[in-house]
Image (spheres, rainbow, N blue to C red):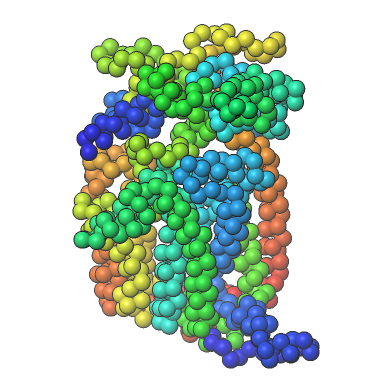
Amino acid sequence: MSHGNYSYTPTNALTKWLDARLPIVRFVDEHLMQFPTPKNLNYWYTFGGILAFMLVVQIISGVVLAMHYVPHETLAFDSVERIMRDVNYGWLLRYVHANGASMFFIAVYLHIFRAYYYGSYKAPREVLWILGIIIYLLMMATGFLGYTLPWGQMSFWGATVITNFFSAIPFVGESITQWLWGSFAVDNSTLQRFFSLHYLLPFVIAGVVVLHIWALHVPGNNNPLGIDVKGPADTVAFHPYYTTKDGFALVVFVLFFSLFVFFMPNMLGHTDNYVPANRLVTPAHIVPEWYYLPLYAVLRSVPDKLAGVLLMFGAIFVWALLPWLDTSKVRSNKFRPIYRQFYWILMAVILILGYLGAQTADDSNVVIPWTGVELPIGKLLLSQICTVYYFLHFFLITPAIGLWETPDPLPESISKAVLAKKSGSSAPAAAA
Amino acid sequence: MKLKALLAVVLSLATAGIASAEGASTTAAQHPEPQQWAWDGVFGKFDRQQLQRGYQVYKEVCAACHGMHLVSFRNLSQPGGPEFTEAQMKAIAASFKVPALNENGEVVERTGIPADRFPSPYPNEAAARAANNNAYPPDLSVIIKARHDGANYVHALITGYSDAPAGFQLLPGLNYNPYFEGHQIAMPAPLVSDGQVTWPEGNPPATKDQMAKDVVAFLTWAAEPKLEERKAMGVQVIIFLLVLSALLYLAYKRLWRDVDH
């Protein structure tokens, strides 16, 4: 639904006066309250609101942490511990912020994979989708920069590994890397600029989020059926219908978040980050945060550094091409019996890559987690197979299936599909 | 590169560190046996008596070589910790010597006050290495959080010393311990006999295992002094959120009752 059919009328002298000068009340009324939203959105659609909430949580907790944190190589580690010990509720702020980053990524992955499943990237939502990819890239950068700040062993060596990616660039790689470091190695100048950028980027994210929501509010929400809204019968007002639904989902999400903050605050971190950074001791096993693991496995699957780095960035950028690689006219996988299978295969491949990314880089065989069963395939070979499959999924399987697959019949409208489902018909499409 | 790798290996062995030698599969660290800890679980709390005993083990055994520069003496009487009385805590602080400057700017030692941190027995890392066969006894402030499965690991490590198996090449000055990565550790067995520490009446016998458990409890508190506050708040937060989510769910269902969706 685009603009135009709203019914905001200022009711008193003040709002009339304001509406003629800065129509902010109208804006809120149109975009946050009356905004017509498809009435069939399921719980997977609540993660957008959850993500907005998490951005605010991270900014507020981060701003307060920055009042106590000292970005200096000799003081950073101890200043974080001072926050944990001597700052009032400092332990809470830090655990909220550190676990909040993981929660932010859990939510963003579910948000992205939901959009992928229901075809929310297709016309007319390509710009919305690409803005989302940009937010994800900014989140990756912010998360990485933040992880270096405690200046533990993983902070230091993670920063060393990641910044060394840029040294793979031919001819100017070394100069660029030194420019990023502000030095000839990762040291105090690196830490200070990382702190500065870590403080900056969330506000850049907030700006792109505004564009993302703007781009959402031009065509309106997609929905699990993937069909366009046909009229008022298909929608409800955002408030109070989705504010209550999103609010309920948000509280459940915060419950999950709280379990980590209060009862297992260090589970998603690495013990080595409680060892102060030491440039003379390389950890046996440098692992990134869990949310980078699939990409880390892609990186390591190629023996050549430049090729690995290009492949890793390619693995993200390929998502931006999705609106054009997907040749199917049908948005939702609900009506795509073949492509749906490949959706889940891709999810499995990403999970396997994530598992491989957490393993030591040696030539041993894959061991199935928890069972201890060893598979007759090397870790490197499996990551290579998964990486090849990952790119084949986007460049071959997605365009080919879109052309070849016969989708199931689409329902006539959201409201008709809803009524058919309500009357007990097992095939809502048949009613149309 | 080879030199760098070698340096890394030597340093890590010497610092009770985290790096492991290449091809360490035969000397990979043995998994520590899980113990029952008072602070485990959602409602877990520290045992005050155990923390006080653990402090005594720390003071009489560990503090000979290790410091704890993130923990202050005043913390010993704060809620959620060993909860020594104010007077006991001040006496403990006074039993330590801390470096200071006198009015002439000379480095002197003075008796500790509650605001002081647990001092390192060595003035600096070089002095510590010189006194310890080039090994550096790590600061113990967050050691439990700095090792995988920290509480069980430290318990297993300090009780797990044994004679090297036949054919094992032990480097001079190192000790055999299967729980340590590489199995060779610079630290000599800290707990050598039952009754090494004398506790006041009413405490369990000071067996090696009991002393190890108690000092692990103390070090766990030192690494996470707000653990009790965190868990107590967590229970309240979870209960609040459960009630709130139930109310919101009912509001959501009530509101959507008349919408076909």
* A371 shown above or below A230: above
* Visible residue check, residue A46: no
Q: Quadrant of the N terminus of chain B?
A: top left
Instruction: Give the left or right position of residue A88, taking residue A147 as reference.
Output: right
* Visible residue check, residue A59: yes
Instruction: Give the left or right position of residue A66, taking residue A283 as reference.
Output: right
Residue A166 or residue A293, whichever sits in front:
A166
**Where is residue B3, by image quadrant?**
top left
* A233 shown above or below A144: below
Residue at 35% x, 30% y: name it: B12
Residue at 59% x, 85% y: name it: A233
Residue A194 or residue B165, whichever sits in front:
A194
**Where is residue A404, by image quadrant?**
bottom left
* A122 shown above or below B152: below
Instruction: Give the left or right position of residue B251, taking residue A429 as reference.
Output: right
Residue at 45% x, 15% y: name it: B189
Instruction: Give the left or right position of residue A28, taking residue B21 as reference.
Output: right
Residue A316 or residue A413, whichever sits in front:
A316
Q: Residue furthest front?
A: B104
Query: How far across and how far down the image is residue A118, in percent?
Result: 44, 72
Query: How far across and how far down the image is residue B94, in percent?
Result: 67, 20
Residue at 69% x, 11% y: name it: B200
